[in-house]
Amino acid sequence: MPEITFHHSDGRNDVVEVAEGTSIMRAALTRSIPGIIGECGGQAMCATCHVYIRSDDHLGKLPRLGEDEDEMLDCTAHPRDPRRSRLGCQIPVTEALDGLEIDLPETQI
């Protein structure tokens, strides 16, 4: 199973194995990882699963940024990074994302 590291703003890290096809948001919620709320349940309608992709290597392996996701990223509680910000609900985990490192914003709301 692919492994993902969630980096918290206070310096803590959570490393989890994630079944392929599971979204980053769902993986965080099922493991009670603080920093991801997922208020809309994965519909790209709330921006409470905003994450920053840490590694340039993984940026090219992510699904394309959709129009709805792009619009919601303009509504995040913490500033959007033009290259690294994504919604966790829109990224299904694949073997290509093994080792993915994610920075969590200080707040989602």
Image (tube, rainbow, N blue to C red):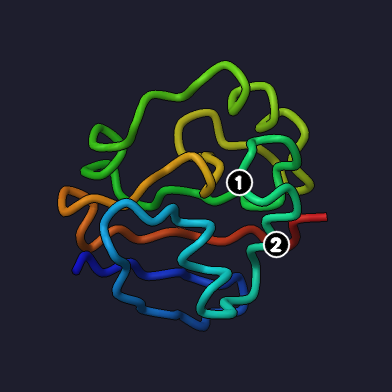
Numbered disc total: 2
Relative vertical location of residue 19 with respect to residue 53 in this rendering, above or below: below
Picture quadrant of residue 68: top right
**Residue tagged 1:** 42
Picture quadrant of residue 43: top right
Task: Identify which residue, 53 or 90, lies in the foreground.
Answer: 90
Task: Identify which residue, 62 or 94, lies in the foreground.
Answer: 94
Secondary-structure class at tag 2: loop
Relative vertical location of residue 1 with respect to residue 22 in this rendering, above or below: below
Label 1 packing within 10 angstroms: few (<14), some (14-19), many (20+): many
Name the image quarter holding the C terminus: bottom right
**Residue tagged 2:** 37
Residue 17 in the image: state x and y as whole percent.
29, 74
Circles 2 and 1, Cβ within 8 Å, touching? The answer is no
Secondary-structure class at tag 1: loop
Picture quadrant of residue 15: bottom left
> Which residue type does callout 1 highlight?
Gly
Give the label on residue 7, or none: none
